[in-house]
Image (cartoon, rainbow, N blue to C red):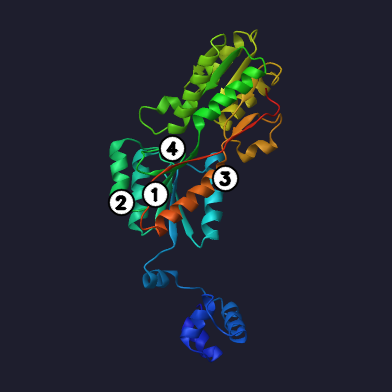
């Protein structure tokens, strides 16, 4: 059984108050503090966080709702959130909604009921009713990427501008046909795919500037058959695939390798997000860095500011993105 504060005080010959001051970084003589910390360490002292939260009226816990933990996009964000929260003395409670709209709402409600001080979400729900649900919880909330409304803070990059810059890079390489691969478009009627819709808008806006080029969009979850059809018809025109996520680009790369196609000799390929997995892939994928770590870190900082502030106004925060011109165009 772990040692208690009272037992530490008895062993060290000091008061309970002195022990608490030493353990919490308060003013205690160096000799006494060292003795208390040594006894605590030797006896595996663990602070009673529940009691501390009841005493101070704070849990120092943040809730995080993520879509899944298989996609590297979300894994990178979670790692950063965890580290950033820990640096600021907060514990993170991470839950996974597994792309279920109903489950996402239940998890958000559950985190609020468990006294989280704030919640971070990359929401798949959308609409006025969902906005009202979030506001009814009366708890600080920050969205990462997917926006719900102007009444809730969102941290993101300018996805539309990033997509336009991606198209301009492809055009500068001499490509005459650009295929935009965006599987989430298949779910736009039911799910919040704000990020991907902004990328679609950017693609269309950029292509409107270049009417001489041919464009095509693939908005199906099963996108590889359409990619195969395009390639089977012949790649006489210099063709590039711009994917709304690196994972889609990697699927095309894997398919092309199996078919004996060479990138960028046979077709160009570009992704979005710059997930960490790319460092192990050859050829090096040309992509857009959407500053995943920066967005996640800023979201934590913004959430804690919202928690600590008596007067807080929701905002849309845009961070910088970067075009990474590598080896696949």
For marks 2 and 4, the one nearer the N-term is 2
Visible residue check, residue 3? no
Return the x and y of residue 295 as percentages of the image width and height: 52, 44
For marks 1 and 4, the one nearer the N-term is 1
Q: Are marks 1 and 2 in contact (CB under 8 Å)?
A: yes
Q: Label 4 neighbourhood size at 10 Å, few (<14), some (14-19), many (20+)?
A: many
Q: Are marks 2 and 4 in contact (CB under 8 Å)?
A: no
Q: Which residue is mark 1?
A: 141
Q: Residue at x 36, y 60 (%)?
A: 115
Q: Which residue is mark 3?
A: 293
Q: Secondary structure at mark 1?
A: strand
Q: Are marks 4 and 3 in contact (CB under 8 Å)?
A: no
Q: Which residue is mark 4?
A: 146
Q: CA distance from mark 1 to mark 2?
A: 9 Å
Return the x and y of residue 40 as percentages of the image width and height: 56, 79
Q: Which residue is mark 2?
A: 137
Q: Against 137, is 156 above or below?
A: above
């Amino acid at each position: 059984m772990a040692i208690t504060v009272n037992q530490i005080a008895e062993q060290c010959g000091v008061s309970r108050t002195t022990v608490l001051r030493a353990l919490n970084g308060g003013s205690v003589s160096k000799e006494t503090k060292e003795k208390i910390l040594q006894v605590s360490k030797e006896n595996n002292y663990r602070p009673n966080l529940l009691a501390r939260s009841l005493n101070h009226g704070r849990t120092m816990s943040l809730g995080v709702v993520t879509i899944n933990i298989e996609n590297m996009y979300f894994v990178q964000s979670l790692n950063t959130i965890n580290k950033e929260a820990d640096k600021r003395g907060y514990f993170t409670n991470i839950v996974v909604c597994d792309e279920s709209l109903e489950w996402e709402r239940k998890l958000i409600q559950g985190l609020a009921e468990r006294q989280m001080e704030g919640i971070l979400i990359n929401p798949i729900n959308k609409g006025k009713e969902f906005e009202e649900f979030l506001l009814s919880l009366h708890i600080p909330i920050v969205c990462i990427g997917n926006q719900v409304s102007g009444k809730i803070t969102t941290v993101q990059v300018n996805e539309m501008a990033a997509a336009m810059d991606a198209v301009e890079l492809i055009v500068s390489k001499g490509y005459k046909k650009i295929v935009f691969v965006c599987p989430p478009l298949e779910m736009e009627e039911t799910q919040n795919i704000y990020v991907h819709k902004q990328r679609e808008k950017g693609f269309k806006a950029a292509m409107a500037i270049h009417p001489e080029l041919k464009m095509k969009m693939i908005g199906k979850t099963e996108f590889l058959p359409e990619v195969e059809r395009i390639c089977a018809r012949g790649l006489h025109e210099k063709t590039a695939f711009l994917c709304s996520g690196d994972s889609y680009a990697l699927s095309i790369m894997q398919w092309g390798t199996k078919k004996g196609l060479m990138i960028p000799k046979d077709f160009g390929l570009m992704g979005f997000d710059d997930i960490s997995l790319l460092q192990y892939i050859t050829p090096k994928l040309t992509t857009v860095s959407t500053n995943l770590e920066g967005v996640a870190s800023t979201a934590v900082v913004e959430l804690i500011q919202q928690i600590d502030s008596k007067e807080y106004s929701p905002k849309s925060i845009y961070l910088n993105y970067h075009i990474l011109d590598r080896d696949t165009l």
